[in-house]
Every structure is written in structure tokens, then in C-alpha cells.
Amino acid sequence: MSSAKITPSAATLTTTIKHLTCTFQSPRIRTLYTYNSSNLRRNTLRRSLTVTMSSSSVSDPLEVCVKTSVTNPNYHGDCPFSQRVLLTLEEKHLPYDLKLVDLANKPEWFLNISPEGKVPVIKLDEKWIADSDIITQSLEEKFPDPPLRAPPEKASIGSKIFPAFIGFLKSKDPSDGTEQALLNELTAFNDYIKENGPFINGKEVSAPDLSLGPKLYHLEIALGHYKNWSIPDSLPYVKSYMKTIFSMDSFIKTRALTEDVIEGWRPKVMV
Ligand SMILES: N[C@@H](CCC(=O)N[C@@H](CS)C(=O)NCC(=O)O)C(=O)O
């Protein structure tokens, strides 16, 4: 079992960045802490205000199982559902302990806690919980501060983009309508963000953005690589939305490696 402690905890926040980079030697941990260093400065200010009010900020690291990278075995892999959970933990400033799982060769301990053999899985109150929908709802209930909840009618905004992207990615026939189906979904989202943005719930990032962002990241990389396709300039609000989400510290820290996203979609493209 590979594991690494990710520690935006109160104790760590008081530790110097220099100390952190000296303590950990593996490339993955160094990468994570590079991002943590900038996060650290940003979060320290916020945390110093909330730490005395919120017991969740000093909790033990939460154990979370995610897919491992296929191109760098010490790094997290290309699962958008796992990134959604990691983004939620980051945005809520919760410390977590990553367990990297090789999905091509699932270990016994993992199948014991995730009978369906799927990631992400998280341990909350001594119970392992699967499925990013359930995990993110449980995190919201247990750690409501800062709130990420959006009104129910906004939860499904943009949710048809991902299946439309997969349909187009797998398509071998340029005239089968799958590209147009994707463009229709992206256009609807463009219009929504134009009226309601910059985020799905308005001014602040919220749970639906943390679900959609990783899927748009996969869309951009996979369609760029396999179809030489990119979001058209006629959809500027989608483009600026993606740029905003992709440049968030939490996103940079939790995103998959480009090579993993490409490799992850290869079997779907090749059938
Ligand atoms: N509905 C689930 C989907 C999770 C899922 O499909 N995870 C994939 C990786 S991205 C998985 O574990 N697949 C099992 C496998 O590849 O064997 C969620 O939202 O968490």
C-alpha cells in the first residue's frame, strides 16, 4: 500500500516550508509540498481566523484511496471522481492521507474496503465510504465550514457534458452527431455561466464546480490528444470557466498528470 500524508493541518501550518521540503524526499511528496507551500501561505491567513472555531481543522488525517498513476507509481492517477473528493478536502482545508491503489491489480485490502473495487473510498467515523457523490455529501455534513453546498437545482448544471464528451471521444464516424451533441451541452453551459457565473453557484466555487472541473480537464486533454479538438472560441465563458478552475491552487495540487489522462482514455478510444 503506498501512502503519503497530505497535511494542511493546524500543526503543519506552523511548520516552516523549509522544514517540509527537507523532511520528505520522494518526488511525489516534493511535488505535493511545492503546491502546499503556496497553499500554505494562502491558507495560513484564513486558518488563523478559523482554527480556534473549528475542531475539524485539527482532526487526524482522513484516509482516502485513489487510483495510482500508471506513468509515475508514486503519484495519484487520472480518476476525475477521486480528484473531486481531493478538491473537496483541499477546499475544506482537511488533512488527508492518500492510499494509492493500482486498479489493474487490486490488492486484497482494497477489495475488502471497496467491494465494487472502485475508487474513491474514504474512511469517515471508522467506516469506509465509496462513491464521490456520497463522499462529498458526507464531508459537507461532517465538516460544514467552509460551506461548498449549492442549491439542488444547480447540482446538475453541466452534468451532461461528460457523457457527451465520452460519446464524441469514442466515435469513429465524424457525421454521427456526437460532436454536435457535445457542442450543444457546452453551449448550454456557456450561456448559463454567462448569466450566472463566474462559477456555477455565482461568485464562489461550490460542490458542482468541484465535480465538473476534473471532467472538463479530461475533456480538454483527451480531445486535444486523440481528436486534435479544442473548445471553440465561440464559447468564451466555457473557456474562461475552465481557465479559472484549472488555475485554482487546489486543482493544481490534485490534478492528474497529462500522460495519465491520455493513457487512461486510450482503451476507450481504441475499441
Ligand atoms: N460513481 C463513482 C464512479 C467511480 C469510478 O468509476 N471510479 C473508477 C476510476 S475513475 C474505478 O474505480 N473503476 C474501477 C476499475 O477501473 O476497475 C463515483 O462517483 O465515485
Image (cartoon, helix red, strand yellow):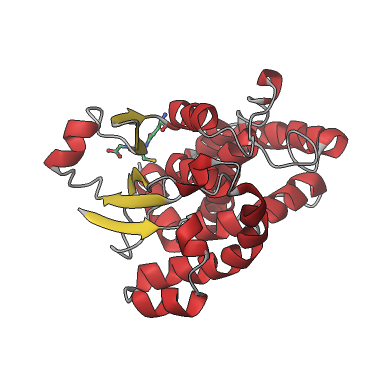
* Image quadrant containing the C terminus: top left
Depth check: give the residue in front, 148 or 160.
Answer: 148
- Left or right: 179 as drawn, with respect to 222: right
Name the residue furthest front: 52
Along the line of sight, which residue is nearer the eye, 70 or 153? 153
Count of numbered circles on the image? 0
Res. 139 visible in picture: yes
Quadrant of residue 176 in the image?
A: top right
Percent across and percent down for residue 46 are 67, 54
Question: Quick check: which quadrant has ligand 1?
Answer: top left
Residue situated furthest top in the rendering:
153
Q: Residue 77 location, x and y as percent?
A: 38, 53
Residue for point 60% across, 29% down: 159
Q: Is residue 169 visible?
A: no
User: Which quadrant of the structure image shows residue 246?
Assistant: bottom right
Q: Is residue 213 above or below residue 22?
A: above
Q: Of residues 150 and 166, which is closer to you in this image? A: 150
Asked whether, in this view, residue 34 is left or right of residue 118, the answer is right
Q: Position of residue 189 (x, y in %)?
A: 74, 34
Residue at the outermost right position: 195
Quarter of the figure with residue 181: top right
165 vs 86, left or right, is right
* In this view, 91 is above or below 144: below
Residue 2, image x and y in percent?
24, 57
